[in-house]
Amino acid sequence: MIQNIPLSYYLIISTLMFFIGIYGFLTRRNLITMLMSVELILNSVNINFVAFNRYLYPQQLQGHFFMLIVVAVAAAEAAVAIAIIINIYRNFKSIDVENVDEMKY
Amino acid sequence: MLNQVMFFLFGAMIVIFSLLTVTSRKILRAAVFLLFVLISTAGLYFALNYNFLAAVQLTVYAGGIVVLIIFSILLTSHVSERAVMAPLKQSLLSALATVAGATLTLMTILRFTFVPSSAADPHFNITDVGNALVSYNRDGYALPFEVVSVLLLAAMIGAIVVAKKEKMLKK
């Protein structure tokens, strides 16, 4: 299954994905697209965990559980972030970070 | 041969669609590109022979989180609206920082030669994963499982309280 594909290839793909996510987080101005960049970053970390588990320690399950827990944390984070974004939209009629400049509730 | 072709296909899809996700001006389109990235990641897990993880990736990420994101896009912006990007100077600076970081990380990764374990592929099935998840013995993960369930419950209640309308809170 994994012959002819070195582990480094997986790491290269996840590195590229991670830094693309960081680029999006730095340049986007819309809260939802920033959240999407964070999802990219979390997903690239998952690829690393799973690939290391498969290549270096195939008898163990650590990578599996790290990946499952990161997915659960990502789901919780997305739910709370979207609740906050909807609340911000209700108060400011916009979700651009430039327009949200006061923390009054 | 075939697995190499599939690997490079999924890898190229991941990189291209990630780039499109962060550069697309239309927010809804960016969300769909994110969906493609997550599905290609599930393809990579299938290539590694981890079927359960690929299924989790497809159901929770591609099925759950992307739908949540698309719903909130439809609630908060018009479909025809175009996303505002950072000013050119800031984009260039962040691109520079990102490329520098990526180069540094890639150089560090490529200097190492990872020796794959020569042990035979043990073929975990879902029963093994489930047993380890609730076992409290040496290789059990009962504590992280419980912590994550409490976290999910707290996040769920928190999201409901935050997104509630003010009028309902006062009642």
Image (cartoon, rainbow, N blue to C red):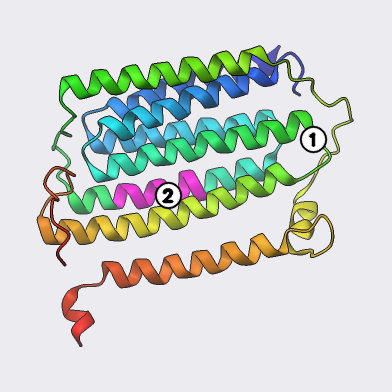
Nearer to us: label 1 or label 2: 1
- Residue at 65% from the left image edge and 62% from the top image edge: B145
- Magenta region: B60-71
Q: Amino acid at mark 2?
A: Ile
Query: In the rendered image of this protein, does residue A13 appear above or below residue A50?
Result: above
**Same-chain status of marks 1 and 2:** no
Taking the image as shown, residue B124 lies to the left or right of residue A84, namely: right
A57, B26: nearer the viewer = A57
Which residue is label 1 attached to?
A: A57
- Residue at 14% from the left image edge and 64% from the top image edge: A104
Q: Quadrant of residue A67?
A: top right
State the image coordinates of residue A65 (x, y, percent, origin top left). 67, 49
Say what secondary structure mark 2 lies in.
helix
Does any portion of residue B18 appear in the rendered image? yes
State the image coordinates of residue A40 (x, y, percent, origin top left). 44, 36
Does any portion of residue B6 appear in the rendered image? no
Label 1 and label 2: CA atoms lie apart by 30 Å
Q: Chain of mark 2?
A: B
- Residue at 67% from the left image edge and 28% from the top image edge: B47
Query: In the rendered image of this protein, does residue B114 appear above or below residue A68?
Result: above
Q: Amino acid at mark 1?
A: Tyr
Which residue is label 2 attached to?
A: B65
Q: Residue furthest right?
A: B119
Taking the image as shown, residue B34 lies to the left or right of residue B148, namely: left
- Residue at 53% from the left image edge and 20% from the top image edge: B105
